[in-house]
Amino acid sequence: MAWRWGLFFYMAAVTVAAFLYAPLARKLHEQTRIIYWHIPVAWVTVVAFVVAGWHSWRYLATRDLGEDARAAAAAELGLLFCVLATVSGSIFSKGMWGAYWNWDPRQTSIFFLLLIYAAYLTLRAAVEDPARRARLAAVYGLFAAAVTPLLIFVVPRLFFTLHPDPIVNAGGKLEMHPRMFQVFMAALGGFTVLFFWVYSLDVRIRLHQLRQDGVLPGAGKDRSA
Amino acid sequence: MSTWTAARAVFAKDVTTELRSRYALSATAVFALASLAVVSYAVGPFGGRPELLAAFLWTVLLYAASAGLAQAFLREVERRTWLTLRLVASPGAILLGKGAVNLVLLLATEALVVPLFLALFGASFRSLPGFVAVLLLASVGLSAAITIVSALLAQARAHGALVSALAFPLVVPVLMAAVAGTRRALVEPGVAPPELKVLAAYAGVVIGMGIVLAEHVLDD
């Protein structure tokens, strides 16, 4: 319990530091603040995607519906963080470029990542049989995971982008003030821990439900997630 | 029976069936022609910019492909030939055979649509070989991805709008690279644009994943 309060105060401290400790970036002005939320939630979106892909692969290897529950939990949370990344990105876009949406290649990538998550969950909703649902969703999730690196890392480079360079840019150099970097890394760590905490809760609920339904053995042992 | 022999048999069976009914080819071609006519009519004589032309062409081809190519597996389910097909051929052979049929269907549709498109919009390519390379590689990627999605959905007993909903996010890299490559072929000479690498990588990834996951794609 104590570490959850610790996480709460840690995230609060990161928020304060983003406003009072980190300096503003030269060209971004007050929009600088949003990078401490926007990039970490976009990062968590990708982490959730990798977690969903890993458990999809595990499901196909083991046919354990618990793995499917873990993949589904990661995908649902990934969708939530993807929405947050899209919204925070469009607020940044409005501040910097005057429009919430302009189909910048980075905006296009995150929007289609959102569509992939939504399509994955739609496919899950379309199939009733749990084993078939798990298999079809796992296969779709793995295909999506295989093409997503092209969508995020390769295709945007074919087009002109207004989006600032990634934190570590193409030249491999870190172009960020040290105090900004400290706050940024702290936010990245905080959001990652937050994701895994909520994820573990969601997985426990799902596994408990599967045990109650008799799909998984060991009713009552729902703290093993 | 080896995978290649079985895939060739699936391909021959589907081509024979298609030549009898011409259902999938008509569905894809008529859909493409209708959307092309709508786009051309709506745009009127002002759509000559390469950025717009490339986007129009690939929008038409993408939706025609989603509408037509998805029939491959659904028809097996509707005709109740699905289980027999599964008994006589391995999942890899079925995917390869159906994917090849879909590629041929898409290329046939493109052979009809692209010249009409050029005529309707009064466009011409600075690099025809560059465009043909983009078209071929994009068609391989598109038909492979749509074949796999339609195989999944045929087992979900849920088709219709879901094909576009599920296939569209997966084929976005193809769409973006094909639009960029077509635009380049409209305005620049030369054959080796960077878009071709993306299209080749995409086709390789999807076909490779299809081979690795074939047993799981068709497991019923």
Image (cartoon, coloured by chain):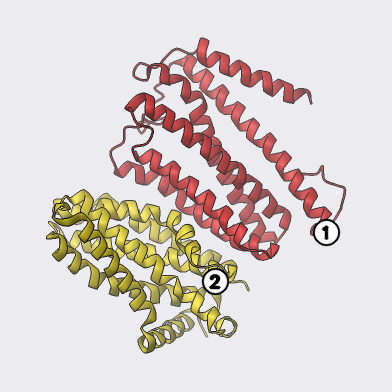
Which hue is chain A drawn in? red
In the rendered picture of this protein, how many numbered marks are placed on residues? Answer: 2
| Residues indicated by labels 1 and 2 sit on the same polypeptide chain | no
The x and y percentages for residue A166 are 40, 31
- Horizontally, residue B58 falls left or right of residue B81, namely left
Q: Residue furthest top?
A: A20
Residue B83, placed above or below residue B62: below
- Horizontally, residue A48 falls left or right of residue B75, namely right
- Horizontally, residue B177 falls left or right of residue B192, namely right
Q: Nearer the viewer, residue A86 or A194?
A: A86
* Residue B25 seen from this side: yes
The x and y percentages for residue B2 are 51, 82
| Residue that carries the numbered disc 2 in the rendered image | B154
Q: Nearer the viewer, residue B130 or B26?
A: B26
> Which residue corresponds to the image point at 79% horizontal and 26% vertical from the top-left?
A1
Residue A99, located in which quarter of the rendered image?
top left
* Disc 2 crowd, CA 10 A, few/some/many (<14, 14-19, 20+): many
* Residue A21 seen from this side: no
Residue B181, placed above or below residue B149: above
The x and y percentages for residue A81 are 56, 37
Which hue is chain B drawn in? yellow
Residue B197, located in which quarter of the rendered image?
bottom left
* Amino acid under disc 2: Ala
* Disc 1 crowd, CA 10 A, few/some/many (<14, 14-19, 20+): few
- Label 2: chain letter: B
| Residue that carries the numbered disc 1 in the rendered image | A214
Q: Helix, strand, or loop for circle 1? A: loop
* Amino acid under disc 1: Gly
> Which residue corresponds to the image point at 40% horizontal and 39% vertical from the top-left?
A107
Q: Helix, strand, or loop for circle 2? A: helix
